[in-house]
Image (cartoon, rainbow, N blue to C red):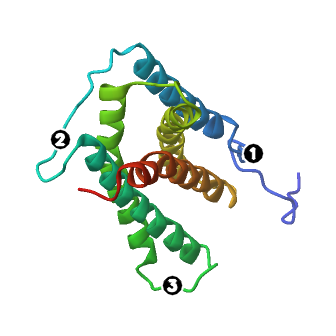
Amino acid sequence: MTVDPNAATQSWPSPEPERRPGAARYLIPALVAAAVAVALGAYGKVHDPAGTAFNLAGFSSTGAVKSWLATVAFFFALVQLVSALMLYGKLPGPRWAATAHRWSGRVAFLVAVPVAVHCLYALGFQSYESRVLWHSLLGCFFFGVFSAKMLLLRSERLPGWLLPIVGGLVFSALTILWLTSALWFFRTFGVTT
C-alpha cells in the first residue's frame, strides 16, 4: 500500500459549514419592539389617568416640566444625529464622536423616561384629537423601536444599512413627539418655566 503525499487530508471530525446568522437575530428585536409598544399602549389605554405624576420646583406646571425635559431629550437626539453622521463618514468629526454618540443617546433616553412615565401615568393613551393620537402612538412606537435598536447593537455582522435605519426611526419618532408636545406647548402657552 502506498500513500500519496499530495492527497488532501481530512480533519476529524469534518468541519461544519459556517452557519449564516438566521432571521431570528432580526425577528427577536422586532418582536420585542412590538411587545414594548403594544404593552405601553395597552397600559396607557386601560390605566385610569391620575392627572399628574410629578412636578419640579421652579416650574409653573407639569406641562412646562415635560416640555423642557422633552426639549433637552430632543437636543441630545440632535447630537446623536450629528455624531452618527460623523461615525458613518458623512461629516468630518473628532475621534471622540463615538463617545459623544453613546453618551448623548444615554442622556436623551434618561431625560425622556420621566416624560414618558408622566404621560402614561398622568394622561394615558389619548385619542380625542389627531395631534394627541399621533403623540400617543408615536410615544409607544419610540420606546418599542428604541428597544429594538438596543438589542441590535449587541448583534454581530449586521448589514451596514440596518442600524442607520433603526436609528433614523428612533430619531424621527422623537422629533415628531417633540413637535406634538413641547413645541405645541410652547406655541400654545408660551416659553415658560
Under tag 3, what secondary structure? loop
Q: Name which of mark 1 and mark 2 comes first in the sequence.
A: 1
| First in residue order: circle 3 vs circle 1 | 1
> From what the image shows, is residue 86 above or below residue 138?
below
Residue under numbered circle 2: 55
Q: CA distance from mark 2 to mark 3?
A: 39 Å
Depth check: give the residue in front, 84 or 191. Answer: 191
**Residue lying at 41% horizontally and 13% vertically, measured from the top left:** 46
Q: Which residue is mark 3?
A: 93
Q: Position of residue 96 (x, y in %)?
A: 40, 80
23 relative to 111 in the view: left or right: right
Report, in whole angstroms, how far the alpha carbon at label 3 lies from the one at label 1. 41 Å
Tag 1 residue: 17
In percent of width and height, residue 78 lies at 48, 66
Q: What residue is drawn where x is 49% and y is 32%?
A: 136
Q: Foreground residue, 105 or 5? A: 105
> How would you rate the neighbour count of disc 1 (Cα within 10 Å): few for under 14, some for 14-19, many for 20 or more?
few
**Is 186 rendered above or below residue 145?**
below
Q: Quadrant of the C terminus?
A: bottom left
* Amino acid at the residue labelled 1: Pro
> What kind of element bears circle 2?
loop
